[in-house]
Each structure stands twice: as structure tokens, then as C-alpha cells.
Image (cartoon, rainbow, N blue to C red):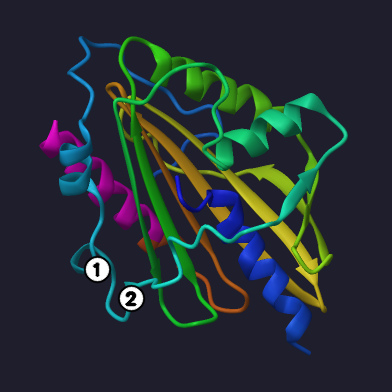
């Protein structure tokens, strides 16, 4: 992926240095086993990704969303946090090769809130294993530190988040950080639909994507993935 989910949250937090329902227990949402459909191809994913028309009024495509120039570094005191960060950065070193992948990035204004969606498809049970590993990692990771390319450090706290169970399996967590006296909150949702993984994240400095809108967008995104399959 050209831009990681972690970078989305970090970008919002690092900006601070220039500034004076129907729910389940978070992270333990249920899933239904069934015969898997085939994984999405790159072309399928292009059709499945969210567009501006799928979002609430006022959103636009983020022109900086596909920037490869993010030189930020992440540190933690536990292997579990390293695994969590790798998952959020779509930096999978398991050896599994995606059959398809793609992403879409949006913003409400130059200072957010921001929204990032990524879809990755695998053959076999790699998507299942990835969700399981992600859940285990986030449940054992309390915090990690992101260092921007200018040396600014922001520590993110990781906590569970209540969210409906979508697709075949759902994991929801919340990243939070404080800098310059302002709190940044970045919800992150991972949903498995058949052999496809969707990651959906939102972040903002003062203005945030309302929880009800995030749920609506997530439901729309899952519906589009199912339709593309």
C-alpha cells in the first residue's frame, strides 16, 4: 500500500505541533463460517473501493493520500506492538502474496478529518490468519511511539472500541494521542469478507467523523466488497 493506516493517524497527530447503535464487545466480534467465495482481483477491488459518492456530504478525495514520502518511524517495547504496527502499515512479512490490493483516501478539509480504506485479497486462509493475528496483537499492545521525519514524537495509546460485527469477522480498536494540548482519536476497523481484508481508519485533530457516519461508511464498504465478489 502506498500509504499506511498508521500514517493516517500519525499525520493528524503530528499536525498538532503546528497548532496552539448495535454493538458487540470491541475486538471480540463474532463471525459466521461458510464456503468462501474467490478472492477479489485488482480490477474487482477498483470497483469495490469507496468513492466520494459513498461518503457523507462535504468529503473529497485526498490528493496527498497516495504520498510515498512518509519517513516516519515507529518504536515499541513489545513484539506484539510491532505486529500491530506492521498490520496497520500493511507490512505483511508472513510470505503471503496478495491476489489483489488497492486503497482510497479522503478528507473533509486540509486538516481533516481523514478517511483511509484499503482492501487486500488472498487465496486460501491467509485472510483468516491475518485477522486472528491482528486481534491477538492489539489485545496485548498498550501503546507505541511514532516519530515524524522532523523528529517529533507522538505516543499512541491502543484501546478496544465497540463496533458492529460486519462481514465474516470484525476487529475494532481506537488509537489516541495528545500533543500541543489537543487529543487525536483514530478509530480503526478491520473486516474480513470471504478471502478479502478491509481496513478502514479515520483520524482528525478537532473535527472527527461521527461514529454513526463511520458505521454507515463501513457497512457501505462491506456491501460493495460483497457485490464485487
Please give the name of the residue rendered at 78% of the width and 25% of the height, measured from the top-left corner: 79
Residue 26 appears in the rendering: no
Q: Position of residue 1 (x, y in %)?
A: 45, 45
Tell which circle, 1 or 2, labels the residue nearer the N-terminal end: 1
Q: Contact (CB < 8 A) between labels 1 and 2?
A: yes
Please give the name of the residue rendered at 49% of the width and 22% of the height, measured from the top-left corner: 130
Label 2, residues with CA under 10 Å away: few <14, some 14-19, many ≥20? some
Examine the image and state in which quarter residue 83 appears: top right
Examine the image and state in which quarter residue 33 appears: top left
Along the viewing direction, whichever of 135 and 81 lies nearer the viewer: 81
189 is within the stretch colored magenta: no
Instruction: Provide the major secondary structure of the magenta segment.
Output: helix
- Horizontally, residue 189 falls left or right of residue 212, namely right
217 is within the stretch colored magenta: yes
Q: Position of residue 208 (x, y in %)?
A: 52, 71
Q: What residue occupies the far front of the structure in this picture?
A: 69
Where is mark 2, residue-wise?
A: 59
- Horizontally, residue 7 falls left or right of residue 102, namely right
Quadrant for the C terminus, please: top left
Q: Which mark is residue 142?
A: none
Please give the name of the residue rendered at 37% of the width and 11% of the height, measured from the top-left corner: 125
- Horizontally, residue 10 falls left or right of residue 67, namely right
146 is higher (above) or lower (below) than 206: above
Along the viewing direction, whichever of 214 and 15 lies nearer the viewer: 15
Q: Secondary structure at mark 2?
A: loop
Q: What span is in magenta?
A: 214-229
Where is mark 1, residue-wise?
A: 52
- Horizontally, residue 47 falls left or right of residue 198, namely left
Report the number of numbered marks: 2
Q: Position of residue 161 (x, y in %)?
A: 58, 45
Amino acid at each position: 500500500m502506498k500509504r499506511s493506516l498508521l500514517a493516517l493517524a500519525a499525520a493528524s497527530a503530528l499536525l498538532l505541533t503546528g497548532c496552539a447503535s448495535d454493538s458487540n464487545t470491541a475486538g471480540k466480534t463474532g463471525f459466521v463460517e461458510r464456503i468462501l467465495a474467490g478472492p477479489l482481483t485488482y480490477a474487482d477491488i477498483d470497483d469495490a473501493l469507496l468513492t466520494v459518492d459513498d461518503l457523507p456530504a462535504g468529503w473529497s478525495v485526498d490528493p496527498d493520500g497516495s504520498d510515498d514520502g512518509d519517513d516516519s518511524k515507529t518504536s515499541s517495547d513489545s513484539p506484539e506492538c510491532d505486529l500491530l504496527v506492521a498490520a496497520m502499515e500493511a507490512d505483511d512479512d508472513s510470505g503471503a502474496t496478495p491476489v489483489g490490493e488497492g486503497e482510497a483516501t479522503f478528507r473533509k478539509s486540509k486538516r481533516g478529518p481523514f478517511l483511509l480504506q484499503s482492501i487486500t485479497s488472498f487465496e486460501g486462509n491467509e485472510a483468516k490468519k491475518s485477522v486472528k493475528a491482528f486481534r491477538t496483537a492489539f489485545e496485548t499492545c498498550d501503546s507505541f511511539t511514532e516519530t515524524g521525519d522532523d523528529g517529533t514524537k507522538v505516543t499512541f495509546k491502543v484501546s478496544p472500541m465497540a463496533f458492529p460485527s460486519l462481514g465474516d469477522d470484525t476487529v475494532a480498536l481506537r488509537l489516541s494521542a495528545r500533543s500541543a494540548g489537543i487529543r487525536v482519536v483514530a478509530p480503526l476497523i478491520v473486516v474480513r469478507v470471504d478471502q478479502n481484508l478491509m481496513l478502514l481508519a479515520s483520524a482528525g485533530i478537532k473535527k472527527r467523523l461521527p461514529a454513526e457516519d463511520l458505521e454507515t461508511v463501513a457497512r457501505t464498504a462491506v456491501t460493495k466488497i460483497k457485490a464485487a465478489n
